[in-house]
Amino acid sequence: MALTEATQEAVWLKAFLCEIVEMKNDESVKIYKDNQGYIALAKNPEFHKRTKHIDIRYHFVREKVADGQVLLQYCATKNIKADLMTKTIPAAQFDIFVACWGSRHQGLPSRVGVL
């Protein structure tokens, strides 16, 4: 579901930017996903018995991959920086992500209490 929405937004943004900046529209948009099964399914246009339950939304991603508008690439779950905002992650990984964003972790205040 999230990949479908990301694909829709990426395709729209690329078309919008190409129109206002007058740039070429011949390069694929790279979208990173941590589910190798989904990437394989999106790249393989064949219909299988095990995939007949897939919702029509997911076929949109498949079409954009086939058209060359979108390029799906695997990214390990531990390297997905969006998890910083959506999931509980270990402190060491949190510090790495914060550093990648150009921020720094301030830690806890020296005194915690009620005013």
Image (cartoon, rainbow, N blue to C red):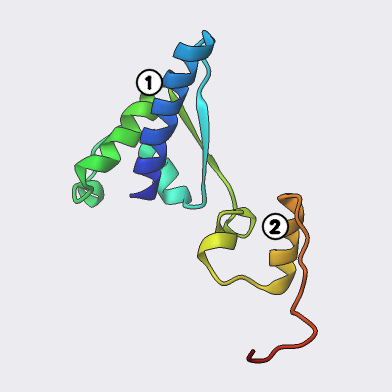
Asked if residue 91 is positioned above or below residue 13 in the image, the reply reads below
Residue that label 1 marks? 67
Asked if residue 93 is positioned above or below residue 4 in the image, the reply reads below
| Quadrant housing residue 106 | bottom right
Q: Residue at x 48, y 49 (%)?
A: 36
Asked whether, in this view, residue 57 is left or right of residue 38, the answer is: left
Residue 44 at least partly seen: no
State the residue in front, 83 or 78. Answer: 83
Residue type at mark 2 is: Phe
State the residue in front, 72 or 110. Answer: 110
Asked whether, in this view, residue 63 is left or right of residue 115, the answer is: left
For the residues carrying marks 2 and 1, which lies nearer the camera in this image?
A: 2
Q: Residue at x 75, y 60 (%)?
A: 96
Q: Residue at x 75, y 55 (%)?
A: 103
Residue that label 2 marks? 97
Secondary structure category for the residue under label 1: helix
Asked if residue 114 is positioned above or below residue 79 in the image, the reply reads below
N-term mark: 2 or 1: 1
Secondary structure category for the residue under label 2: helix
- Please tell me how crowded label 2 is: few (under 14), some (14-19), or many (20+) other residues with Cα within 10 Å: some
Q: Residue at x 55, y 61 (%)?
A: 85
